[in-house]
Amino acid sequence: MKRVIVTGGAGFIGSAVVRMLAGEADVEVLNLDKLTYAGNLASLRAVENRPNYRFEQADIVDRAALDAIFASFRPDAVMHLAAESHVDRSITGSKDFIETNIVGTFTLLEAARTYWSGLPEADRQSFRFLHVSTDEVYGSLGETGLFKETTPYDPSSPYSASKAASDHLAMAWMRTYGLPVVISNCSNNYGPFHFPEKLIPLIVLNALEGRPLPVYGDGSNIRDWLFVEDHARALWTIVRSGRVGETYNVGGRNERSNLHVVETICDALDHLRPAATPRRDLITFVTDRPGHDHRYAIDATKLETELGWRAQETFETGIRRTIEWYLDNGWWWQPLRAGVYAGERLGLSKP
């Protein structure tokens, strides 16, 4: 039985990882989550009663809590996904991003190092610490080219700067102390259980309610979209087979402009839930986000060739699955829209 701690396991990507691991017969998974506004245990309803799943509410900046969890659970691996992750919120509330993404990662690395140092040699060799990061650390691409693992860091937002710092901490703990760290950098995720502040769920839900569909700038910003379950599989592949000290980029090879994404959602909803007028009429161009990177695109060749991972969903199949999930699962998102986030504009910078 392999024991895995997943930090941020009640978040969007983390919950997909936990659901996947809880379905493995030879894995015991502990979900460590602070339960901030974006942490939602309802996302884990399908696995909450499984005997190989545990939940611990804790903050990764709390060293005492981390030490107790490591001592009692005795993990073979840590998959570190806990993070403040919304760029817009980082513009107006950067302090939380510094504390969680930088100080929290430091604290977790130190707790993991202390635990790992006390393991028998064979267990020390097999232990893994996967630090999960983002392609936003690389900055913005021009019209051509792809982010590679060797692309220099050039973060633009408080969020991406905090993730870049945490990447460097994780790699430094490997080089200085020998902690067996592997890093992954992913492109934009989407899929079921995505908190409604992010582009795709926001557009789906606003469109269903006949509300304006905000598109930043002229909508030409391009992202490489990765279905969240494909990402979860990639992360588990990296934990099991990735080389210590390496970085692996995870991307879906699905570049789409933001406007194209919004129009695709509108057209799909018009087909699945016809309305009196085309939902494209709801598209509203708004003032762009400060420091908005123009284009991201991941070269996942290293992950594909070295570890044999492949994305199973195209953007067309993944977006259809995502839209249908939101149509069928109002029980999950309606309480969030009513009591946590109602769809208001975020990230408007102030002096």
Image (tube, helix red, strand yellow):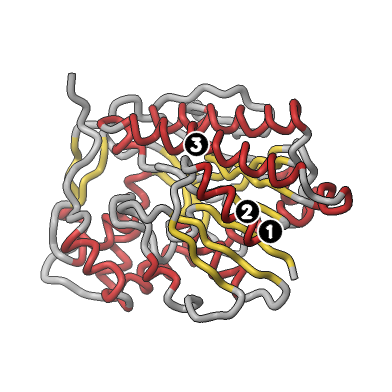
84 or 312: nearer the eye?
A: 84
Residue 234 horizontal side relative to residue 57, left or right: right
**Of marks 2 and 3, which one's residue comes earlier in the chain?**
2
Residue 61 horizontal side relative to residue 275, left or right: right
Q: Residue at x 36, y 52 (%)?
A: 261
Q: Which residue is mark 1?
A: 74
Measured as percent of width and height from the top left, residue 218 is found at: 27, 35
Q: Secondary structure at mark 3?
A: loop
Splitting the image into 4 quarters, where does residue 178 fall? top right
Q: Which residue is mark 2?
A: 70
- Tag nearer the camera, 1 or 3: 1
Please state, as top left, top right, bottom left or bottom right, where the N terminus lies in the image: bottom right
Q: Pointer 1 and pointer 2: residues touching (CB < 8 Å)? A: yes
Q: Secondary structure at mark 1?
A: loop
- Using the numbered discs, state the Cα–Cα distance from disc 2 to disc 3 in whole angstroms: 36 Å
Would residue 30 be seen by someone viewing this image from the given angle? Answer: yes
Q: Residue at x 31, y 71 (%)?
A: 332
172 lies above or below 39 = above
Q: Which residue is mark 3?
A: 296
Q: Mark 2: few, some, or many residues within 10 Å (few <14, many ≥20)?
A: some
Q: Residue at x 16, y 63 (%)?
A: 338
